Amino acid sequence: VCVLNLVFFCNFSSHFSIPFCSSFFPFSATDSSFCFFHEMKPIALNGHTRALTSLKFNREGDLIFSTAKDATPSVWYSHNGERLGTFEGHEGAVWCCDVDYLSRYFISGSADNTLRFWEVQTGELLQTIQTKTAVRACAFSVDGSMFVYTTDATRGNLPLIVVVDVAKLLKGDDDYGVAEMTIAKKDKKATTVIWGVDAIITGHANGDILSWTTESLNKQRPVSVSSIHEQTITDLQFSADYLFFISSSKDHTARLFNASSLEALKVYESERPVNAASMSPLRDHVIVGGGQEASKVTTQGKSGKFDARLYEKVLETEIGRIKGHFGPINAVAFHPNGRGYASGGEDGYIRIHVFDKIYYEYE
């Protein structure tokens, strides 16, 4: 178990009386800011041998599913960090995963050109979908009856977005595909995907965010398009009520969107690439993770900014930072009860954080 610092930025109206420390973080004295240091003790999970790529809580929040570049998806108890088991079979880096709302089925997509469909309780591999290129992103529909996955563009193959019927797949039917779309340009491949109540939402390598129905996918006509991001979309996550979603991008920002219209509502700015972002279901807070690539930190001689950052969702202001990882943060996810979050980093660690009393007192 490790100890890390949680840092809050408060204004003069706060009831805390803490010395000014602008030298630690780059905020000027004119901001009337104070820093509050508080120790939290996260659970550090050391089960992966390479960098983390994704994290997912199940609906109840008692399980965490993780994938990494070590080809072994894992499942953990969230309350104590015990690893229940691994899903054996992939032969390359695993880029994505998702679990259905009943925690019955689990999907994972890999650089070994497969998407694999598993039973959660037993870890049994039920079906394998062979693809021509790496599977980059995947997501179940809200009711778990279908899932969507996206593929990369390599070796002359164009990227795809594919929707699969779960029942037909489990029966072994060859016509399990519900919808399929080929992306005409390789630089517009879908890098992340989520599935809400009314639409599938994809984030792309060129910074576009698009919403689809299964019908519009077959017609290759998105319902809505947002091009406000300037670089690759690295993550998309819904709010608890599916009315909004948050994006993260290599353009150093995370943004809050209306899920129906794709209207950009808020922006959370950083000085480093943002690899993941998540919204609290309990408070109006957003957490983002990222950081400069390790190679660039070494060559440029600068701090990598590997701390997770908390923002006030409405005011767009940064309110705190949480240290701990020794490399870029590649995945973050709030617990479904909002009382903590998990992060996964380039250092191969998963960190489960439970907020202390001070978090709930902060206004």
Image (cartoon, rainbow, N blue to C red):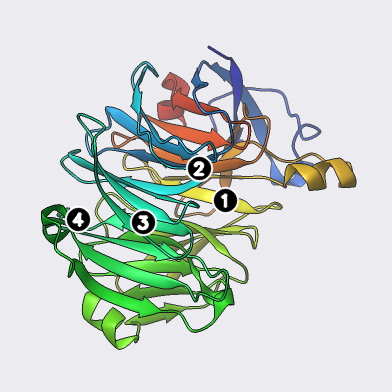
Please give the residue where the numbered disc 2 appears in the rendered image.
331
Q: Give the quadrant of residue 58.
A: top left
Seen from the viewer's position, the closer of residues 28 and 296 is 296
Dot 3, how many residues are within 10 Å of its Cα: few (below 14), some (14-19), or many (20+)? many
Total labels: the figure holds 4
Q: How far, Cα to Cα, is label 3 from label 2?
A: 15 Å
Q: How far, Cα to Cα, is label 1 from label 4?
A: 24 Å
The residue under label 3 is which amino acid type? Cys
The residue under label 2 is which amino acid type? Ala
Looking at the image, do the residues carrying marks 2 and 1 touch, with CB atoms under 8 Å apart? yes
The answer to whether residue 35 is left or right of residue 57 is right
Residue 243: percent from the left, percent from the top?
Answer: 28, 61
Dot 1, how many residues are within 10 Å of its Cα: few (below 14), some (14-19), or many (20+)? many
The residue under label 1 is which amino acid type? Asn
The residue tagged with tag 3: helix, strand or loop?
A: strand
Question: In the image, which disc is placed on residue 138?
Answer: 3
Please give the residue where the numbered disc 4 appears in the rendered image.
142
Say if 323 sits above or below 125 in the image: above
From the image, state whether disc 1 or disc 3 is nearer to you.
3
Q: Is residue 83 visible?
A: yes
Instruction: Please tell me which of labels 1 and 3 falls first in the chain.
Output: 3
Instruction: Please tell me which of labels 2 and 1 falls first in the chain.
Output: 1
Question: In the image, which disc is placed on residue 275?
Answer: 1
Q: Is residue 261 visible?
A: no
From the image, state whether disc 3 or disc 4 is nearer to you.
3
Residue 178: percent from the left, percent from the top?
Answer: 20, 72
